[in-house]
Image (spheres, rainbow, N blue to C red):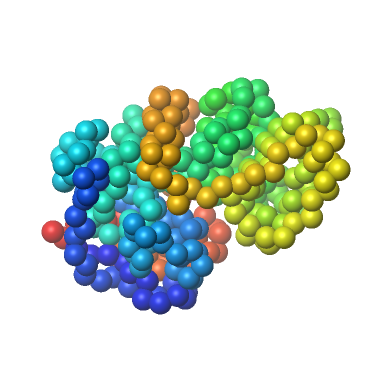
Amino acid sequence: MKAICISQPGGPDVLHLKEREIPQPGPQDVLIQVAAAGVNRPDVSQRKGNYPAPPDAPADIPGLEVSGTIVAVGNNVKLWEVGDQVCALLAGGGYAEFVIAPEEQCLIIPEGVSLQEAASLPETFFTVWNNVFDIGKFSKGERVLVHGGSSGIGTSAIQMVKALGGTVFVTAGSEEKCSFCRKLGADLAINYRKDDFEKVLTQYTDGKGVDIVLDMVGAAYTESNINLLAHGGRLIIINAMKGRMGSVDLIQVMKKRLTLTGSTLRPQTPAYKGQIARALMSKVWPFFPDEIKPCIYQTFPLAEAAAAHELMERSDHMGKILLEIQSTI
């Protein structure tokens, strides 16, 4: 099969199309002939040498999510059959014509979503459900601040929180991106390059603040995030793009009974991820395609993975970036 491989840590130019052996599924795995693969920031980190793959994933083939058709199943697989079309969360290896996935990490294709579009769903929807709904214990009526509202995570969070009865505020880096977020359902979108989001939200909420902050920025936003959290609020950190050492006012944490937490999903067990998959299919998938839809910015052929990474690093995109994979086998 053909696969995009990382020749050495570095820039997008280290991504090369190579021939690899088709992987063989284990007893509880399925083999997927890939139609499309999502491009995500962890892929960029892996390419740079900062986010090594776990032992059960290819060390040099990035890719955390795919869609495609199951072409083989392990001896103990009970949930899927050959010929089923699925999207799946992976530990790695998605930039390839074929990939194996634990059966528990596969999901049905939501109604109204094409096979290719479905590749845009697993990584961000798993991440948002795990953090906002499981760890963050979101309740209907709560106010959620999402940083990076036009990103893949952001667009998924906007739609999921709105569909399940919440209020969503976002930050984004341009008026175009803010407008895009509002069209998706954001109640307020703040251009962080022009306005102080803490001041804007304090005024907008009459000082009540927000219940949950989903933050991928890190240290640069920590103080404002804590200031904005209401009593019992939760700050959930999923990346630290602008620094890992933030300033925390411990008195505020105590007085407001705040929770500061975070997570990484990739090293979790298939059983853990399987619980998220079941929750998504039962509680979120029914909102497709009327209240939730894929947000795809641009699709590249597999051989142009380097160009897809360049776009990701420029942060010009709004929504997801995909690689389209047409099998040569």
- Horizontal side, residue 157 vs residue 222: left or right: left
Residue 20: horizontal and vertical position, in percent? 22, 67
Residue at 45 percent of width and 25 percent of height = 283
Residue 74: horizontal and vertical position, in percent? 18, 44
- Horizontal side, residue 268 vs residue 227: left or right: left
Q: Could you say which is closer to the camera, residue 270 or residue 200? A: 270
| Quadrant of the frame with the N terminus | bottom left
Q: Could you say which is closer to the camera, residue 83 or residue 148? A: 83
| Quadrant of the frame with the C terminus | bottom left
Residue 189 appears anywhere in the view: no
Residue 35: horizontal and vertical position, in percent? 26, 50
Residue at 16 percent of width and 60 percent of height = 328
Residue at 86 percent of width and 43 percent of height = 251
- Horizontal side, residue 173 vs residue 98: left or right: right
Residue at 40 percent of width and 77 percent of height = 8
Residue 114: horizontal and vertical position, in percent? 31, 39
Residue 305 appears anywhere in the view: yes
